[in-house]
Amino acid sequence: MPGVEIYTTPFCPYCTSAKQLLRQKGVDFTEIGVAGLPQKRAEMVARAGGRTTVPQIFIGETHVGGCDDLYALDEAGRLDPLLRS
């Protein structure tokens, strides 16, 4: 299973929802908080191709995007294969 990283901020409902889906699927992930950490936020923006909103989710080297993107992948049946690759 590839590593999963999720950039988050506290009290973000989209971050909470994305983490909840990953937990439901039994996925271990690394949470990277960016609140008040300009270096981590800059890292996130660079990795996410300029996207500045949280969460930003990465599965292995694949940038999934945000919470809506994660749920769309799941609904399309493409999340589980990505998690197993």
Image (cartoon, helix red, strand yellow):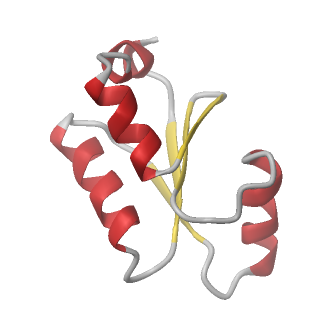
Q: Is residue 12 above or below residue 81?
A: below
Q: Is residue 84 above or below residue 55?
A: above
Is residue 76 found left or right of 43 in the rendered image?
left
Is residue 15 found left or right of 74 in the rendered image?
right
Q: Is residue 77 above or below residue 16?
A: above
Residue 60 at x, y percent in the picture: 58, 28
Name which residue lies at 30% across and 28% down: 74
Quadrant in which residue 73 is drawn: top left
Which quadrant would the N terminus be assigned to in this image?
top left
Front residue of 27 and 41: 41
Residue 47 at x, y percent in the picture: 77, 47
Q: Is residue 8 above or below residue 72?
A: below
Residue 80 at x, y percent in the picture: 31, 19
Residue 82 at x, y percent in the picture: 44, 18
Name which residue lies at 40% across and 64% down: 15
Name which residue lies at 30% across and 37% down: 27
Quadrant in which residue 61 is drawn: top right
The extreme bottom residue here reads 36
Q: Total number of numbered labels?
A: 0
Name which residue lies at 40% across and 22% down: 83
